[in-house]
């Protein structure tokens, strides 16, 4: 499908900033957050607040509903910010447009469902409003593309992408793992489409917001979406990941380095710095995975200790070795390299297991 897509926001020679609370809770909370943002030394390109909240489990705050739209309108009239909210059905679209919301966004739980996306696309026919489309909750590039196509076919030409990471079973440092290769691949199909990193929903905590935002800029993203709240600790949703407007400025935005300024993305793939940034991301993930493997080795170590089993089990090692070597050839990796790599990892695992074996039995194994 040949698409002529325009940017939903003006591209700047600095990262675009979308910020505001996860949810609109009260008029005071929305206005106070906007006021503090307006008084800082930052430029807010779009003020966000969720009015209808898709919560994973019931009995949580599910959004303030229609009356919250009025508060967003007030933010727009008082501080001159353009405003945005998530829409998930026809009625949301109509109400948001009626009150003058400038930009709409589709959430991850909507993008995942073609029925919902189509319903919104139908509601948008004949309307000229910019729309951001978040990635679906599962790492399915085609589903994300499908949503873009449905919205575009409805006549919307100003479309942007928001990368908010992907659900994964099990514990990781992220709430939603970034899987950077997916938005990067999408960017290969749509080189000019505005791409924003929603570091807040990737991280799920305040801890890695800066680092994830910086990685996004290193990968040539156009900007960031970061949730900010006047009183994050007491937020009614996503309390752990929100920051105050001051923290947003001092701890994140002022430290971010934008590698390139004011350039089109035409050279995205040929640009050596982009390729290097992609390698850096992969290296980081590799080391994280090796560390995860060592943790499991330690658990095995503690099991062996309890049951008085020797660390080195040759038959198990031979089995691993043969299996991985078989995998190497078709992937274009030399036997010599894979053999060295595997032996080094195995040796490190043995050190980790030995460490456990040597521990006093009353010491806690982490
Ligand atoms: C949000 O932006 O507050 C939100 C609900 O995000 P997501 O759709 O990415 O989960
Ligand atoms: Mn949120």
Image (spheres, grey):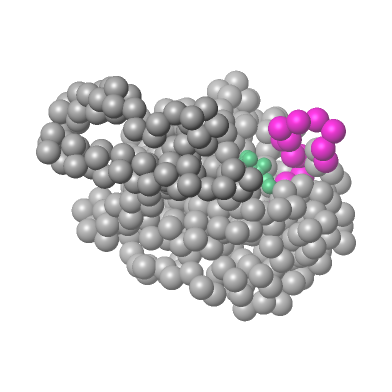
Q: Is residue 61 left or right of residue 259?
A: right
Instruction: Give the residue drawn at x 80%, y 54%.
Output: 235
Q: Quadrant of residue 246?
A: bottom right
Q: Nearer the viewer, residue 96 or 240?
A: 240
Residue 227 drawn at (x, y percent): 66, 56
Q: Quadrant of the C terminus?
A: top right
Query: How many dots with numbers?
Result: 0
Q: At x 87% / y 54%, what residue is drawn?
A: 26
- Front-most of residues 156 and 14: 14
> What is the x, y in percent for residue 120?
62, 30
Tell me if residue 56 is in the magenta stretch. yes
Q: What residue is drawn where x is 30% and y is 43%?
A: 347
What residue sits 54% from the left and 75% below the top?
A: 254
Residue range in magenta is 48-61
In the image, is residue 81 above or below residue 129? below
Residue 51 percent coordinates (x, y): 77, 44
Quarter the N terminus occupies: top left
Please identify the quarter of the rendering in which residue 310 is found: top left
Quadrant of ligand 1 in image: top right
Instruction: Please name whichever residue, 141 or 235, is drawn nearer the observer in this view of the structure.
Output: 235
In the rendered image, is residue 45 in sight? yes
Let me know if residue 131 appears in the view. no
Q: Nearer the viewer, residue 202 or 125?
A: 202
Question: Quick check: 63 above or below 215?
Answer: above
Position of 273 with respect to 177 (left or right) is: left
Q: Is residue 207 magenta?
A: no
* Residue 66 pos. (x, y %): 83, 42
Principal SS element in the magenta part? loop
């Amino acid at each position: 499908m040949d698409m002529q897509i325009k940017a939903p926001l003006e591209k700047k020679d600095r990262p675009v900033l979308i910020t505001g609370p996860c949810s609109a809770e009260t008029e005071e909370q929305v206005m106070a957050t906007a006021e503090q943002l307006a008084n800082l030394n930052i430029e807010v390109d779009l003020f966000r607040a969720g009015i209808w909240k898709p919560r994973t489990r019931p009995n949580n705050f599910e959004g303030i509903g229609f009356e919250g739209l009025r508060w967003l309108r007030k933010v727009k009239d008082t501080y001159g910010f353009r405003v945005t909210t998530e829409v998930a059905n026809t009625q949301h679209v109509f109400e948001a447009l009626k009150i003058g919301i400038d930009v709409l966004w589709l959430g991850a739980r909507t993008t995942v469902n073609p029925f919902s996306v189509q319903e919104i696309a139908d509601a948008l026919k004949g309307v000229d409003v910019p729309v951001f489309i978040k990635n679906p909750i599962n790492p399915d590039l085609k589903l994300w593309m499908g949503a873009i196509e449905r919205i575009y076919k409805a006549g919307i030409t100003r479309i942007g992408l928001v990368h908010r990471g992907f659900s994964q079973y099990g514990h990781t440092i992220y709430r939603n793992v970034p899987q950077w290769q997916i938005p990067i691949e999408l960017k290969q199909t749509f080189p000019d489409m505005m791409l924003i990193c929603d570091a807040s929903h990737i991280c799920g905590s305040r801890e890695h917001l800066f680092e994830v935002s910086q990685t996004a800029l290193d990968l040539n993203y156009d900007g960031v979406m970061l949730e900010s709240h006047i009183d994050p600790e007491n937020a009614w949703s996503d309390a752990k990941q929100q920051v105050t407007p001051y923290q947003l400025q001092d701890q994140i935005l002022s430290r971010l380095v934008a590698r390139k300024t004011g350039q089109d993305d035409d050279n995205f793939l040929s640009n050596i710095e982009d390729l290097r940034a992609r390698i850096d991301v992969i290296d980081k993930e590799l080391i994280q995975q090796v560390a995860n493997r060592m943790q499991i080795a330690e658990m095995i170590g503690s099991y062996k200790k309890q049951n008085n089993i020797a660390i080195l089990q040759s038959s198990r090692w031979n089995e691993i070795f043969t299996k991985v070597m078989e995998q190497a050839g078709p992937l274009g990796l030399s036997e010599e390299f894979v053999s060295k790599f595997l032996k080094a990892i195995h040796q490190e695992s043995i050190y980790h297991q030995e460490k456990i074996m040597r521990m006093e039995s009353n010491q806690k194994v982490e």
